């Protein structure tokens, strides 16, 4: 396959997944902001969202140092100068799809095209302002639809595997960011003993995090217990059967890499395999003992390096 074609396919799926995950992060922050809490705690949540998305400086350049929830959501949803905003991601996914229309099925192209056009219409008509949560749900639904149409209509050749590769590499990155920012949004020591007055807040906080990754029912099925922070971390990091966990994502990355590479001993394969193995044999108590933030920061660095190596080996060197 031509590296330029592979590049467009890889980034089409990454941008679509990024739009979904941005919607998920914004939605969980919006939902938790409706809970009774001090303005300082609420502001830390929005500031953390900007920081983990590496948008703090860009936001300050447009809105100044003050953190206003409405401005943050507007910046991360509809600001076309922000390359990570939902509308920018949907536009970039569509443009990458347009460049390789001959490789995609008609259904895949029409899904990408219609998603972007419908998002533009909804933002112009004020649907987002009227009900942010409903808009975020719509973005997630369109991403689900995109993946479903891809799985249901595409020939499972190299093009298909580059699409899947982009999806799961992006998902691993975003799940790690979401876990990191949400664990740090909890006042005090999230592994310590919480006071009675904090218990209700904790339940809604962790429930919102689980719902943001479609994991609330999964948690109940797996653990059949009250929601505990360390188990939330275990579910989203180490459970291979949880679709959005870091380990599940790396399993998919390894599987799709194996189908597009001709060199099983390549540096890209080695890095992906080592990262997957480290997750496979990790224990949540060890991760928490050494520091969750440090662990996730290192994971994000390694995922980024893996993306660089995938680009060097298969794709057109470019900045996205």
Image (tube, rainbow, N blue to C red):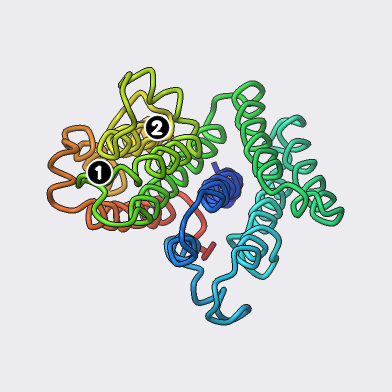
Mark 2, residue position: 252
Quick one: SS at disc 1?
A: helix
Residue nearer the viewer, 118 or 113: 118
- Residue farthest to the front? 197
Q: Measured from the top left, where is residue 179 in percent x and y?
A: 37, 47
**Cα–Cα gap, marks 1 and 2:** 12 Å
| Side of 27 relative to 278 (left or right) | right
What residue is at 66 percent from the left and 44 percent from the top? 133
Residue nearer the viewer, 200 or 173: 200
Mark yes or no: residue 238 visible.
yes
Mark with earlier residue (1, 2): 2
21 is higher (above) or lower (below) than 70: above
What residue is at 64 percent from the left and 68 percent from the top? 71
Mark 1, residue position: 275
Image quarter hosting the N terminus: top right
Q: Measured from the top left, where is residue 255 in percent x and y?
A: 37, 30
Quadrant of res 40 = bottom left
- Residue 9 numbered tag: none
Image quarter hosting the C terminus: bottom right
Mark yes or no: residue 7 visible.
no
Quadrant of res 163 = top right
**Structural crowding at the residue carrying mark 1, measured as other residues with C-alpha within 10 Å and reported as few (<14), some (14–19) or many (≥20):** many
Q: Measured from the top left, where is residue 73 in percent x and y?
A: 63, 60
Q: Measured from the top left, where is residue 116 in percent x and y?
A: 76, 48
Quick one: SS at disc 2?
A: helix
Residue nearer the viewer, 173 or 30: 30
**Structural crowding at the residue carrying mark 2, measured as other residues with C-alpha within 10 Å and reported as few (<14), some (14–19) or many (≥20):** some
What residue is at 59 percent from the left and 25 percent from the top? 151
| Side of 302 relative to 12 (left or right) | left
């Amino acid at each position: 396959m031509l590296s330029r074609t592979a590049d467009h396919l890889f980034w089409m799926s990454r941008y679509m997944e990024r739009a979904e995950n941005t919607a998920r992060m914004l939605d969980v922050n919006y939902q938790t902001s409706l809970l009774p809490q001090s303005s300082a705690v609420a502001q830390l949540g929005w500031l953390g969202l900007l920081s983990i998305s590496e948008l703090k400086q860009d936001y300050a350049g447009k809105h100044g140092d003050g953190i206003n929830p409405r401005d943050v959501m507007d910046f991360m949803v509809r600001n076309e100068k922000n390359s990570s905003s939902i509308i920018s991601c949907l536009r970039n996914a569509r443009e990458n799809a347009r460049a390789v229309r001959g490789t995609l099925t008609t259904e895949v192209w029409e899904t990408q095209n219609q998603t972007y056009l419908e998002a533009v219409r909804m933002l112009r008509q004020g649907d987002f302002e009227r009900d942010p949560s409903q808009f975020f749900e719509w973005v997630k639904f369109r991403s689900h639809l995109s993946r479903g149409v891809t799985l249901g209509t595409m020939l499972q050749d190299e093009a298909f595997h580059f699409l899947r590769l982009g999806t799961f590499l992006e998902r691993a990155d975003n799940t790690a960011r979401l876990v990191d920012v949400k664990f740090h949004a909890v006042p005090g020591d999230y592994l310590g003993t919480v006071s009675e007055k904090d218990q209700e807040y904790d339940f809604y906080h962790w429930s919102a995090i689980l719902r943001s990754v479609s994991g609330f029912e999964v948690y109940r099925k797996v653990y059949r217990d009250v929601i505990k922070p360390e188990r939330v971390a275990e579910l989203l990091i180490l459970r291979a059967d949880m679709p959005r966990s870091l380990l599940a994502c790396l399993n998919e990355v390894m599987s799709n890499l194996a189908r597009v590479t001709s060199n099983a001993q390549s540096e890209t394969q080695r890095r992906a395999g080592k990262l997957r193995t480290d997750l496979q044999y990790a224990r949540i108590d060890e991760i928490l003992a050494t520091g969750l933030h440090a662990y996730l920061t290192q994971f994000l660095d390694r995922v980024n390096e893996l993306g660089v190596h995938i680009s060097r080996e298969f794709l057109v060197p470019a900045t996205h």
